[in-house]
Image (cartoon, rainbow, N blue to C red):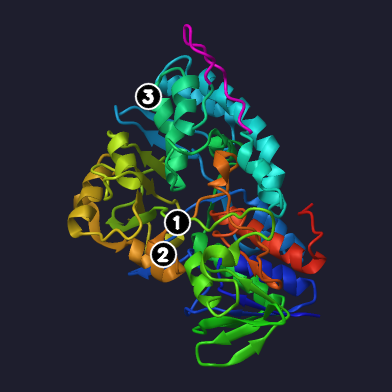
Amino acid sequence: MARIVVIGAGMGAMAAAARLAVAGHRVVVHERSGTYGGALGSVERDGFAFDTGPGLLHLPAVYRDLFVKTGKEPLEKCVELSQVEPAVRHVFADGTAADLPNASRAGVGEALDAALGSGAGAAWSAYMNRAREAWDRTRRPLLEEPLWPNWQVLADREPYPSVPHKRLLRRERRASTLTEVGELELGGDARLLALLEQYALACGLDPRATPASAAVLPYLEHTFGAWSVRGGMRALATAVYERCLARRVEFAFDSPVARIIEKDGRAAGVELADGTAEEADFVVAGVAPGALDGLLSGVSGMSGASGVNIRAEGEVQARSGLPSRLMVLLALRGARPEGTPHRTVLHTPDRRDELDRLFGDRPGLPIAPTLTVLRPDDPTRTPDAGHEAVTLTATVPAHTEVTEADVERLLDRADAVLPGLRERLLWHEVRTPADIAQATGADGGAVPPPSLAAGDGRLLHPANSTRLPGLFAAGGWAHPGGGLPHAGMSGTLVAGLIVEGPDFRGSQ
């Protein structure tokens, strides 16, 4: 039995802790804050409750597997999951609305034909068929296996089978970015292009620079669906935490780690902020890259982001310059109208301005940002049936200092899909990039995207095994990247590498 110290109580770290405890190891989690869940926080006030992280769960199979492998009670015995229907309503810049059904690629095509006109569904369905090929080619190496030592194979090869286009006397042209895919392969409909680009934007990625392999993002949602959790995503974090306790994982809250101890060339424990040293056979770091750099500052050869680089030819660097999120939590009087979608995406009328401000040389809050509106049909989120809890989310640059005028602009935008918002509003609270930074430790409140193939490896995340033997990285800033399911996968991979050793070839 090995003694293992886990730094941080985020979802990836807790997933690793539960699996390691089941394997017979003694696991202690040190969390700098007073609670668990990392990005899966919540706000409760006057009988209202809001998630301050992801509002929906994709790929629930990741957490079903975690619960099956760590105990007798399956996930559905611990939390109540429901497929949301429709999966999402898209309101485009011209006012057109399309309700896309959950987990039905054929149904999505039919819905797009009905909303956007004949041919839109066929163009999108053909794109989804090609996206399936990209998914089949990348699913295992990107999600179910540790990052290969020859990770350049993933970086250099584009798995999306772009359609060749000939232009008069010019040579054949193939799409290499998500925006080019939309322009060349979706029939010239600006609304379909906006639909496609939004999947990258929701992950904090610039579709103009994101490789075509990002086709897997809409494919995942259309194929595996979007799920809500009764009580919000915080209920899922609580279920994972309680599973850890049931497996005798120890938690020390308000217990910041000051540094990782090295002995004989490997991680040998941690030193806490109060000066206490805790020995360990392995250390699992579920923290953001800058925080890990600080913990390794006294370890020879571990300065800078190299602390989380892979031990192989070449290196995958920890990423920076990613955007954050701005959330406005709305407590409304009046019942949620019958038939209201759980999620509505209100598209910007000026995508160029939005992308330039998020990723270009004009940083700042977009004039009219794409807005995601969550209106859960969950009685546990409101004081009674005569009220509604609504969350507005926009992608914004990290380090953004949000003003009241910015919030007012979001409220004005939301009025397009929440008629009478001002009259219904009891109060609102704001969650800024600074709040995300405080909760997760990420620089400027940056949010990590999922790993993607191609693009010269720019969207691959550092491996779970590090250059310091005995130290492993879990969570959204390590392979396979950000997002709730990906965090759970990272925990699976870390546990496999510790239990089975460096020859571990991935989950089965």
Q: Secondary structure at mark 1?
A: loop
Indicate yes or no whether the magenta region holds residue 381: no
Q: Is residue 417 above or below residue 258?
A: above
Q: Is residue 166 above or below residue 456?
A: above
Residue ID for mark 3: 190
Give x and y (percent) for residue 196: 46, 32
**191 horizontally vs 304: left or right:** left
Residues at discs 3 and 2 in contact (Cβ within 8 Å): no
Q: Main secondary structure of the magenta part?
A: loop
Q: Look at 46% across and 27% down and name the residue there.
A: 180
Q: Identify the amino acid type marked 1.
A: Ser
Tell me the number on the disc at residue 443: 2
Mark 1 vs mark 3, foreground winner is: 1
Report how far apart the C-alphas of labels 1 and 3 lie in the structure.
Answer: 30 Å
Give x and y (percent) for residue 211: 52, 36
Query: How many residues crowd mark 3 within 10 Å: few (<14), some (14–19), many (20+)?
Result: some
Q: Look at 37% across and 61% down and name the residue there.
A: 384
Q: Identify the amino acid type marked 3.
A: Ala
Q: Is residue 495 above or below residue 204?
A: below
Q: Look at 54% across and 33% down and name the residue there.
A: 212
Q: Quadrant of residue 491?
A: bottom right
- The first of marks 3 and 2 along the sequence is 3
- Camera-nearest residue between 195 and 288: 288
Q: Secondary structure at mark 3?
A: helix
Q: Is residue 293 above or below residue 365?
A: below
Give x and y (percent) for residue 325: 37, 55
Tell me the number on the disc at residue 25: none
- The first of marks 2 and 1 along the sequence is 1
Mark 2 vs mark 1, foreground winner is: 1
Quadrant in the picture for the N terminus = bottom right
Give x and y (percent) for residue 382: 38, 61
Residue range (magenta): 159-173
